[in-house]
Amino acid sequence: MEQTHTLDGASVTEQQQAAEVETLVRDLARAARSAQRVLARMRTGEKAAALMAAAAALRAAAPQILAANAQDIAAGEARGLSGAMLDRLRLDDKRLEGIAAAIENVARLPDPVGQEIDRSTALAGMTLVRRRIPIGLIGIIYESRPNVTADAAALCVMSGNAALLRGGSEAVHSNRAIAAALASGLASAGVPAEAVQLIPTQDREAVGAMLRAAGLVDMIVPRGGKSLVERVQNDARVPVLAHLDGICHTYIHAAADPAMAKALALNAKMRRTGICGAMETLLLDAAFPASQDVVAALLDAGCELRGDARAQALDPRIKPATAEDWDTEYLDAILSVAVVDGVDAAMEHIARHSSGHTEAIVTQDQAVADRFLAEVDSAIVMHNASTQFADGGEFGLGAEIGIATGRLHARGPVALEGLTTYKWQVLGSGQTRA
């Protein structure tokens, strides 16, 4: 087909394709909003039963889902995806069972919809009640992790929201197989099919269409790399719940237990290097006596260390850190290391370089721990625990739709409560205003 070009350089056919994608997304969003009104009226038991059916359907479809995932892994390897990206993408029997179990965990959680937040009496004698309600239609844009398809669907259904999902091209076959299984299970229990939809195109215009869908999409949640999240935050005309990076710090204080410090540092970095809760910077107190043992354990475990001059003096295998290292989310077996003079220096380093995700202190000094917990301004702050616990499932939330690092609406792991807003109910007895 011959293409004619407009003044902005785009061909007529390209503009037609973009218009078609825009129409597709808006039609899906309208259908989802209609379905959400039905979902919002469903009782807790009905939503829970639908999620149990979805988990059962996911297990029944395991052979098809794993075969689809194998296609994605093969394509990812051919494209040269990093080991961390492939780890995020990969599914096996254990991980798939974990996804199904997470759906069931969400089904068992207290339903926030309809909960009374507080009750008071107005000056005129009316009773004022704030009550939780669903947000409406949640758009989720995500990369790599096919489990997000299930987690997002489960959390949205249980909180009475519809979900419009747009997964990344690297997980396209896995996402479609998971979404098909979930749709089958949910529909069998009475949830409208349009309540959870996976956008059926990988055209990048679909993301732009979601971001422009003010009045149809009520909130966007991006989960992916820095470029995706920055694009969403820059272009969205819809409220966004997001975090850019997971630059997580662990500070080993002078009064840390050496064995605990080593175990926590190894786990925080090496358990899974490709998750947003993985430690990316280790801060060692200059007065901590076992710093050499900690860095040696990390190096021996296969982690590359990049340090400042004092950190390099601890072990000749530590490479020099650049200025960029302190602001890098590696998502790999690479760690930046700095030696600091006390808790104030540690908190100052964190304030300069943290992305506001998760920070941890290791110490037996409770007073120092209390200062760190109170003064470090991140969404999650830990004492004597691995940053790898920065996860909605580990927090007892069943699953999470993401970890928010902003200060408005929700912060930290966002699960059921974070997917609700509230309305005021005013109960009068004939009051009129003078």
Image (cartoon, helix red, strand yellow):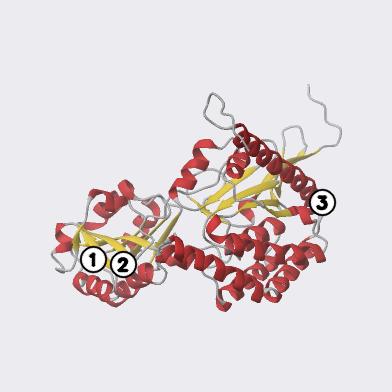
Distance from Cα at disc 3 to Cα at disc 1 = 57 Å
75 shown above or below 35: below
**Of the residues tagged 3 and 2, which is closer to the observer?**
3
213 shown above or below 109: above
Disc 3 designates what residue?
38
Question: Which residue is pictured at 21% across the width and 67% down the height?
Answer: 288
For label 1, the SS is loop
Q: Quadrant of residue 217?
A: top right
Disc 2 designates what residue?
363
Which quarter shows the C terminus?
top right
Pointers 1 and 2 in contact (C-beta within 8 Å): yes
**Mark 2 belongs to which amino acid?**
Thr
Q: Earlier in the sequence, mark 1 or mark 2?
A: 1
Distance from Cα at disc 3 to Cα at disc 2 = 51 Å
Characterize the local packing of mark 1: few (<14), some (14-19) or many (20 or more) Cα atoms within 10 angstroms.
Answer: many
Q: Looking at the image, which is closer to me, 269 or 366?
A: 269
Distance from Cα at disc 1 to Cα at disc 2 = 7 Å
Q: Looking at the image, which is closer to me, 36 or 203?
A: 203
